[in-house]
Every structure is written in C-alpha cells, then in structure tokens.
Image: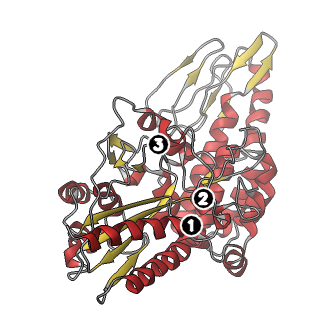
Amino acid sequence: MSPTIKSLSARIKEEAQRLGFALVGLSPVQPSPHEETFAQWLRKGLGGEMGYLKRTEELRRDPKNLVPWAVSVVSVGMNYYTPHPRPEKQAGSRGWISRYAWGDDYHDLMKERLESLLEKIRGVYPEPVEGKVFVDSGPVLERGIAGVAGIGWIGKNTHLISPKRGSWFFLGELFLSVELAYDRPIKDRCGKCDLCLKACPTGAFVGPYVLDARRCISYLTIELKGAIPQHLRPLMGNHVFGCDICQEVCPYNVKAKPTGEEAFYPREGLYAPELIPLLSLSEEEFRRRFRGSPILRAKRRGFLRNVAVALGNLKSLEAVPALIHALRDEDALVRRHVAWALGEIGTAEALEALRKRLEVESDREVREEIEEAVADILSSSLQSLQIHTKKGILPFMKAIKAHYDGHVVVPEEPINLPVNTPVRVLVPEADESTLITEAFAKLSETSFSRIWDNDEDAAYDKL
C-alpha cells in the first residue's frame, strides 16, 4: 500500500471527525455480508408494506449496481443522543417521539457535512475523484457497510452498536473512486444478552437479529400508511413517532455521551409532547410546526392516527372533548382511530358522541370502528353492574350483548354459554324486575327487544 493511500485515509478520518462525525471507518465497495439474509427477510414478508425495499433489492445487496465506478466507501456515524429521560407514566397526556426526531432533520445536516468532506478529499488528492453521498435515503444497506468498516456490529436489536459509543448515532456513506487503507470489522459483542428482545412491547423480534417490521412500533407509527392493526394498538403505549425502547435497555448505551450538535437537541414541544393540542392541527399547521423535522414523514393523517391511539392507551379523560371534535376530521383514517380511542376511554360522553357520529358517518371502515367502540363501552359498563335487591346484591353478566360471551347469571354465579345464546337473568323476587329493567335502560335504550316476568323466570329476550 502506497504512502499516499495511507496518508489520504488518515486525512479523511481526521477531517471527518473535525466535521462532527464521532465514528468513521473505511471499507472496500463489495456486496453486503448480509445480502442473502436481507433477501430472505424480504421473501418472508417481514418488511411489511415497505415496497421500496423490494424494488431496490439488487441495488442494496451489491453497491456496485448502484455506483459501478466506486472503489471505497467512507462510513460515518454522528451522535444524536440527548440526556432527556422518559416522563413518568403519571405525567398527564404526554406522548413519546423517538429521540432521533426531536431536533432538525439529520439528512440535510449530514449530507452537507459529507459533501464538505468530499470537497476536502478532492482538494488534497492529486487526481480527479468521483464521489457520491448517501444519508439514510438511498438504496444502501448502511449497517452492513458500516460493520465492514469497523464502526460497530449489528446487534440483536438490528441496530449498529459501537463498543464505546453505543447505538445513538446516524449513519452516512461517502462512496469514492479511489483506493483507501481499510479498517477491520468488529466482532459481535452482544453475547448472551437479550434485554432488547424481551423489552419490545409488541414482540417484534422473531429472534435475535431478526425484526418483524410489521409489529415494530417505529414501522407502525412511521412507515405504515393505513390503519394500525387493532390487536397491536394497546401494546403501543404513548408512542406517536418511533420508539427507542430496544436501544434504551442496551447495556452499551448506559454511558452514552450527549451530542455536541445543537441541531439534534429537542425543538420546543417535541420532547414528550402534550398530545391533546396535536389533535386539532390542520394540514397547514402540521407542515408549519414540523417543517425541517423527520416527523413530516408520517404525514398529518398518520401522525394524528398515532396521537389518537396514544390517548386511547393513556385512558385520558381530559382528551375526550378533543377526541369528540376529531370524530369530524376530514380524514377517515384519523376518524377510525379516534373512534377506537373513545372506545378505550369509555365514558358516557364518549358513548353518546360515538352514537351520534354513527348516524351520519358514511365511510364503511369508520362505521365498523365506531360500532366496535360502542360495543366495547357497553361491555365494559356492564362488567361492573350490580343491582341491589331485597335479598342482597345480584351479580350481572360480564357482557350483556349475546355476541360477546353469552353468560347466564344467577344470584351467586355467572355461567358461560356459547356465542349467540339467548341471555336469561333469574331474578330472586319478581317485584325487583322493574329496578333491573330501569338499570339496563339507562345503559342502552335498545338493548332488549322485550322483557317479561314469570315469577322466578324473569327473562330478557335475544339482543
């Protein structure tokens, strides 16, 4: 290896660090060591609806297909960690935005720095240099390339981990047409640790090093453009854009050092934001508030969808008026998730609003969400219903609607029945049936088609 190559390589690292890149490594342009694993991951459908990954698969697997003239690649990492903890669970109606999105959009900042690095290289190298910059926007398997360059290893949580810096950093690449002195890869140091796998709220890890994006909170709140699957919504907590949990529990991040880049510190209102005001953002207000922020990627409809789910999970009573107003949002996707949130909170006010909206709602999917939310509220209301009789407390079925559990209730013990079984309530004294009828009528005027008494066999007909 010529002294020129060694000198240029050292100069590149020195300049990259001066530009604010805490991590820098050099590697030859070659197929990704994980190209086949990536292909299998795509074939299994674990990438969800991220169709762009499939469309650019060949470019990602071998950078030569993308930049055929390139010989070397400079991989860099820029620290974005800021020492702000998650708020306590009791902290009102606050949401969580992933740390990387608290400040300015990193794409532009890093791209500008890497372009400066390219110009510096052209200024010191005696021959013409061709170069191309990528910052999490081109068809490049960044973590695999950075791993070959010795920046870190891909951990069980699929993040690139540096033994000294952890994983709180953005990645970028500068492809060059010149040969360099290459670094050696770092061996996997996760060992037997599986804290990240166990900590994932949605169980998104199929196994170590394998993420099912379709269950990942970051995917659900950012990449997924449609409705969030109902069975995953309760598991998402108060996350409205990204997650961070699998990084927060990683031992290599325990002693993470704060970034020196002011641009990555939280903008006003992005660290643990108050969620209720966000529901009323218009399209113009959304774009103005998040101009220059990664949050624009989710678009207004996706972001408000996420906010509604978070408020539903927080069971935020103070959010009910805002959610009721959002039931009239122009976007059906937002209305769907607002209806779900009101169903989770389940107040009488929420129930009344859902019923009124159902009378005018024209979108089929929104109507289905509203109907399910109304059913959930009625079910939860009846779970704790008890009527006082002359002979003590009469326990009632946990779900009065026959299509839930179909219980028959006697004074002491509920009994499970098959779905769609007629519901029958045995009343100790016939003269108490009026009290029972009135109690149910308050919950739903249309719950029962008819009621009759026959001494010890007072029964409610099918619902």
Residue under pointer 3: 202
Q: Can residue 226 be seen in this view?
A: no
**x, y percentage for residue 392?**
78, 11
Horizontally, residue 272 falls left or right of residue 239, namely right
Label 2 amino acid? Asn
Disc 3 crowd rating (10 Å Cα; few below 14, some 14-19, many 20+) is: some
Q: Quadrant of residue 37?
A: bottom left
Label 1 amino acid? Gly
Horizontally, residue 289 falls left or right of residue 140, namely right
Label 3 amino acid? Thr
CB-based contact (under 8 Å), mark 2 and mark 3: no
Position above or below: 133 against 304:
below
Horizontally, residue 190 falls left or right of residue 78, namely left
CB-based contact (under 8 Å), mark 2 and mark 1: yes
Residue under pointer 2: 306
Q: Is residue 166 visible?
A: yes
Q: Residue at x 39, y 80 (%)?
A: 121
Please identify the quadrant where the N terminus is shown.
Answer: bottom left
Q: Residue at x 64, y 45 (%)?
A: 313
Position above or below: 145 against 448:
below
**Colour mapping used in the image:** secondary structure
Residue under pointer 1: 302
**x, y percentage for residue 353?**
74, 58
